[in-house]
Image (cartoon, rainbow, N blue to C red):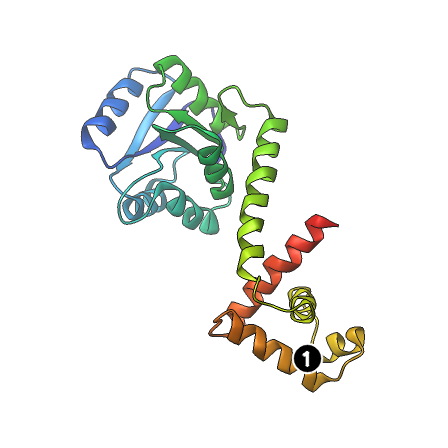
Amino acid sequence: MKFNGIVRLLVADDHQLFRQGIIKLLEESDKIVIVGEASNGKELIQKHTEVKPDVILSDISMPLKTGTEAMKTILRNDRSAKVLFLSMHTDDEYIYTVLKAGGLGLLSKNVMKGELVNAIITVAQGKKYFIGKTEEELNDIIYRYDFLNIGETEKNIDPLSSKEKEVLIYVGQGLTSESIAAKMFLNRRTIDSHRAKIMEKLNLKSLPDLMKLAVEFAYVNRKKE
């Protein structure tokens, strides 16, 4: 929905007193109209479908589904959805969580009214709003925390031999057993045996589980190159 100067806002927070306080505060602005409210992540998804707001103002920590989980679901169905998150925590880890969920901004729950209104309008225009953070700094946060997650992936594959890790990389690149065998100068049976051992050592229960880890590990190795 195109932003026309008056922001249609959906507010989500599981604490009723805080939610009502925010709504009352924002109703004083002639630039914002409240079109709905939600008390948990599941209700937020439902309300968004019903009212199609310009912006969602949401807490991160909510029952049933968190704000970030709800946003991921909403974005799968509506790529134009825009959300500004509120939290008691605004450090880099939370900024990373918001960015990976598709959020456009994060503010402290102690924010002043003027700053909150300004942030809502900025997000309605499709721009990011993270206090004191440049686009370069936001990209740096994503880069740093992606590598923390990569470290976890590397720990997960520690039990594998060097040959098994090589096979895993090729699986993550989408190669068939025949193609992997040709690259490694081995026969297909040996590759299939490596795949079976990988699944056994890492306690993977299905081929989709293997593919997910393989793609992550292949990504890790691309980052190192």
Residue drawn at point x = 24 percent, y = 29 percent: 19
**Number of disc labels:** 1
Q: Position of residue 133 (x, y in %)?
A: 55, 23
Residue 85 in sight here:
yes
Give coordinates of residue 12: x percent, y percent: 30, 35
Instruction: Report helix, strand or loop for mark 1.
Output: helix
Left/right of residue 115 with respect to residue 223 in the rendered view? left
> In which quarter of the view is residue 60 placed?
top left
The crowd level at tag 1 (other Cα within 10 Å; few <14, some 14-19, many 20+) is many
Query: Would you name the residue on which mark 1 appears?
Result: 191
In depth, the one of 180 and 69 nearer the eye is 180
Residue in the image at 77% along x and 81% along y: 186
Identify the residue shown where x is 38% and y is 40%: 52
* Residue in the foreground of this view, choosing between 136 and 190: 190
| Horizontal and vertical percent position of residue 223 | 69, 49
Q: Amino acid at mark 1?
A: Ile
- From the viewer's perspective, tell me whether residue 63 is left or right of residue 158: left
Find the residue positioned furthest to the bottom.
189
- In the rendered image of this protein, does residue 181 appear above or below residue 40? below
Above or below, 60 relative to 207: above
Image-based side of 150 in relation to 75, left or right: right
Give the residue at x 65% y 66%: 165
Report which quarter residue 59 is drawn in.
top left
Residue 139 horizontal/vertical position (percent) = 61, 33
Residue 103 visible: no
